[in-house]
Image (tube, rainbow, N blue to C red):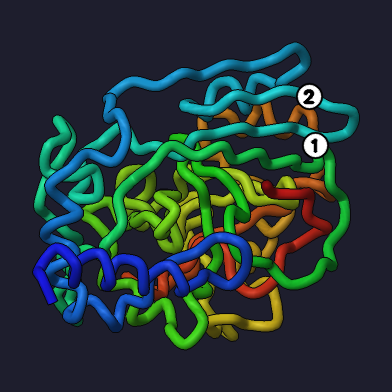
C-alpha cells in the first residue's frame, strides 16, 4: 500500500469515533497508529488563524456578559440568551497546522504522561447555544455531549466524557498547551480547567447551557471541595459546595456587582472547576445544576 493511501485510510478510520453524542472525537488510544497521519495532516492549515476575533452584543444583553465575554455574538430572545461562536482560539496550537502563523509544536506538559497530537485540525464552527437567562431550577437531566457551554474567550465547553470505548483520562493526552483539542470535525473545545483563563483561582471561565456560570477551582480564596466527584458522575458534582457561598458568585469576579444586581441569592448558583489536578480539573460533570437550554 502506498504511503499516501495508508494515510488516507487511517484518517478515514478516525471518522467513526464519536464523543458522547453529536460531536465526534478521535480515540486517543490510537495515537501511536496514527503517527504517520498526524505528521501529514499537520502540514496544512485547517482554518484562517488570527489573534483577533469578532464580538457582538445585541439589545438587552447585560453588562456582566458584555464585560466578560469575547469572540461571541450574543443576543436576547425571549427568556434566553443566544450565544453564537465559531470556537476558534486566538492563540497558538499544533492543531492549526504547520503552515499556520499560529502553529506551535508544544503540547501540555503534565505529570503523568506525554501528550501527542490527535489527527485533527481546527476548523471554524457554527455553534448556537440557547441559554436560559434567569434559571431558578436545581434539578436537571444528564449532560449530553458536544458544546455544553461557552468560555469567556468563545471556546466551546465540553463535559467529562470521551469517545465511546475511550475515557477522558486517555483522551487527555491529546490536549495542547492550552488544555484544548479539536474533534475530527475540527471543533476546538475544553474539557478541563483552561490555563489561558483560570489557574487554581476564582476567575470566571464561562457559562453553562443551563445559564449558571462556571468559575475556577476557588470561591474567592476558598477551594471548592471535591468530595463525591467521579467521572461521569450522577450528580452535578462541580456545583459550588463552599459552605454559605453556594448561592453567591465569587466577589473577586469584576462583574459580580453587575451580576448580583440582576440576580437574587436564590438564582446565583454556579459551578466551579473540580478541585483536582490535570484530567480531574473537570469543567462540567455528569449533570447540570438546572434545566438546560439547547445546543446546535
Mark yes or no: residue 108 visible. Answer: yes
Residue at 71% of width from left, 21% of height from top? Answer: 62
Badge 2: residue crowd in 10 Å (few <14, some 14–19, many ≥20): some
The x, y position of residue 189, in whole percent, is 43, 52
- Local SS, label 2: strand
Which numbered dot is residue 133?
1
Badge 1: residue crowd in 10 Å (few <14, some 14–19, many ≥20): some
Circle nearer the viewer, 2 or 1:
2
Please tell me which of labels 2 and 1 falls first in the chain: 2
Residue at 65% of width from left, 19% of height from top? Answer: 63
State the quadrant of the N terminus.
Answer: bottom left
Residue at 51% of width from left, 77% of height from top? Answer: 226
Q: Which residue is mark 2?
A: 76
Q: Residue furthest top?
A: 59
Q: Is residue 62 above or below residue 108?
A: above
Q: Nearer the viewer, residue 166 or 99?
A: 99
Residue at 34% of width from left, 45% of height from top? Answer: 122
Amino acid at each position: 500500500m502506498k504511503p499516501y493511501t495508508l494515510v488516507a485510510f487511517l484518517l478515514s478510520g478516525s471518522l467513526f469515533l464519536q464523543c458522547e453524542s453529536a460531536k465526534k472525537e478521535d480515540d486517543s488510544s490510537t495515537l501511536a497508529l496514527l503517527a504517520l497521519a498526524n505528521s501529514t495532516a499537520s502540514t496544512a492549515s485547517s482554518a484562517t488563524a488570527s489573534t483577533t476575533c469578532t464580538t457582538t452584543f445585541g439589545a438587552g444583553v447585560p453588562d456582566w456578559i458584555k464585560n466578560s465575554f469575547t469572540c461571541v455574538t450574543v443576543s436576547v430572545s425571549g427568556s434566553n440568551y443566544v450565544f453564537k461562536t465559531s470556537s476558534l482560539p486566538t492563540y497558538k496550537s499544533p492543531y492549526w497546522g504547520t503552515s499556520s502563523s499560529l502553529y506551535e509544536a508544544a503540547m501540555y506538559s503534565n505529570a503523568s504522561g506525554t501528550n501527542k497530537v490527535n489527527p485533527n485540525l481546527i476548523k471554524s464552527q457554527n455553534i448556537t447555544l440557547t441559554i436560559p437567562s434567569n434559571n431558578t431550577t436545581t434539578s436537571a437531566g444528564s449532560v449530553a455531549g458536544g458544546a455544553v457551554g461557552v468560555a469567556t474567550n468563545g471556546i466551546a465547553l465540553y463535559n467529562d466524557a470521551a469517545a465511546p470505548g475511550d475515557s477522558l483520562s486517555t483522551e487527555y493526552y491529546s490536549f495542547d498547551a492550552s488544555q484544548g483539542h479539536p474533534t475530527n470535525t475540527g471543533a476546538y473545545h475544553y474539557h478541563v480547567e483552561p490555563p489561558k483563563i483560570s489557574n487554581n483561582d476564582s476567575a470566571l471561565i464561562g457559562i453553562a447551557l443551563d445559564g449558571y456560570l462556571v468559575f475556577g477551582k476557588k470561591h474567592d480564596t476558598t477551594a471548592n471541595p471535591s468530595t463525591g466527584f467521579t467521572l461521569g458522575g450522577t450528580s452535578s458534582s462541580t456545583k459550588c459546595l463552599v459552605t454559605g457561598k453556594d448561592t453567591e458568585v465569587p466577589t473577586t469576579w469584576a462583574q459580580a456587582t453587575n451580576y448580583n444586581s440582576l440576580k437574587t441569592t436564590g438564582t446565583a448558583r454556579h459551578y466551579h472547576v473540580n478541585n483536582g489536578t490535570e484530567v480531574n480539573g473537570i469543567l462540567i460533570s455528569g449533570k447540570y445544576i438546572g434545566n438546560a437550554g439547547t445546543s446546535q
